[in-house]
Image (tube, rainbow, N blue to C red):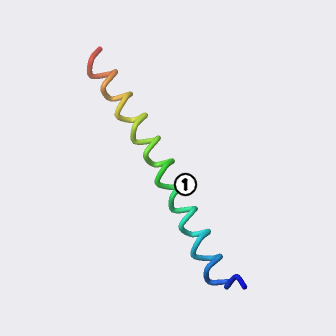
Amino acid sequence: MILFSDVVFQSSALSRLICSAESYIVFKNAVAAFSDSFLM
């Protein structure tokens, strides 16, 4: 039997993982853009 709290915990952990991955991509793009403008 799957508990409702387990489902909520897993979905929140998954959304946290997705958010951290998106913020990492945004941070990496910002660093790349900054380094490009710095090297120009």
Residue at (38, 28) in percent of width and height: 33
Instruction: Give the farthest residue toward the left.
Output: 38
Viewed as shown, does residue 14 lie left or right of 26? right
Instruction: Give the farthest residue toward the right.
Output: 1
Q: What type is the residue that disc 1 sits on?
A: Ile
Q: Residue 5: x percent and y percent?
A: 62, 83
To which residue does mark 1 refer? 18
Q: Nearer the viewer, residue 36 or 21?
A: 21
Q: Nearer the viewer, residue 21 or 23?
A: 21
Where, quadrant-wise, is the N terminus in this rendering?
A: bottom right
- In the image, residue 11 sits, relative to residue 36, either above or below, namely below
Q: Quadrant of residue 38?
A: top left
Viewed as shown, does residue 3 lie left or right of 21? right
Residue at (27, 17) in percent of width and height: 39
Residue at (43, 45) in percent of width and height: 24
Q: Nearer the viewer, residue 27 or 37?
A: 27
- Dot 1: few (<14), some (14–19), or many (≥20) neighbours within 10 Å? few
